[in-house]
């Protein structure tokens, strides 16, 4: 019995299902009006045109970065996929105004945990767009990335991407 408990090495799962971090409309990354995202300069992924200002964790994992301006959060999923949630476009210029974070670097999160809330009306007024890219930033370690069909998604519930690591 002890060999069974202690002799087996725990390994991270190879695949993870990323759920929608916001409620809204799932759109193709190529439709994001910012070339950094639409041309996949930071990595592949998908985007959401949100309906409200609440961002939840799309996976179980660990917070690896919360930007000082609160407009973006990096999460390392339990399978090793590194996910960037970039809330809106040109939101860095807001310098955190209208954003409230509920996590910090090193926090463990579960799917559906609240990460950030933002003033939707203020971001709509002051930023270029509320469109939120969801990017896999360590693409060299990804074996496959399968995106779900575009359309309506619900935060913490709707599967949007299946990522399998090498």
Image (spheres, helix red, strand yellow):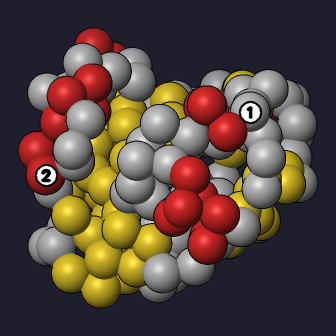
Tell me which residue sits at (40%, 54%) in the image.
129
Q: Nearer the viewer, residue 91 or 85?
A: 91
> Left or right of 166: which side holds 10?
right
Where residue 12 sits in the image (x, y, percent)? 56, 35
Q: Residue at x 60, y 31 (%)?
A: 92
Q: How many marks?
A: 2
Q: Quadrant of the C terminus?
A: top left
Q: Nearer the viewer, mark 1 or mark 2?
A: 1
Q: Residues within 10 Å of mark 2 (few under 14, many from 20)?
A: some
Mark 1 / mark 2, whichever is N-terminal: 2
Compared to residue 126, the image places residue 12 above or below, namely above
- Residue 1 x, y percent position in the rendering: 81, 44
Between 46 and 76, the one nearer to me in the picture:
46
Residue 111: in sight, yes or no?
no
Mark 2, secondary structure of its residue: helix
**Label ID, residue 31:** 2
Residue 107: x percent and y percent?
Answer: 87, 40
Residue 113: in sight, yes or no?
Answer: yes
**Residue 31, placed above or below residue 140:** below
Q: Which residue is mark 1?
A: 95
Mark carried by residue 108: none
Q: Residue at x 40, y 79 (%)?
A: 24
Q: In percent of the image, x 54 and y 61: which residue is there? A: 125
Q: Residues within 10 Å of mark 1 (few under 14, many from 20)?
A: few
Q: Using the image as rendered, state which of residue 159 and residue 99 is in the foreground.
A: 99
Tell me: residue 18, above or below residue 95: below
Residue projecting furthest to the front: 125
146 on left or right of 49: left
């Amino acid at each position: 019995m002890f060999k069974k408990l202690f002799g087996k090495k725990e390994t991270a799962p190879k695949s993870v299902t990323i759920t929608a971090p916001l409620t809204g409309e799932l759109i193709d990354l190529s439709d994001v009006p910012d070339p950094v995202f639409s041309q996949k300069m930071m990595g592949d992924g998908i985007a959401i045109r949100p309906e409200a200002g609440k961002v939840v964790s799309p996976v179980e994992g660990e917070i690896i970065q919360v930007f000082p301006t609160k407009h973006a959060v990096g999460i390392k999923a339990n399978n090793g996929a590194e996910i960037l949630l970039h809330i809106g476009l040109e939101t860095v210029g807001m310098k955190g105004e209208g954003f409230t974070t509920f996590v910090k670097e090193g926090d463990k999160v579960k799917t559906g945990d609240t990460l950030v809330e933002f003033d939707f009306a203020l971001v709509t007024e002051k930023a270029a767009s509320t469109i939120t890219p969801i990017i896999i930033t360590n693409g060299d370690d990804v074996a496959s990335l399968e995106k779900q069909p575009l359309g309506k998604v619900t935060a913490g519930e709707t599967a949007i991407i299946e990522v399998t690591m090498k």
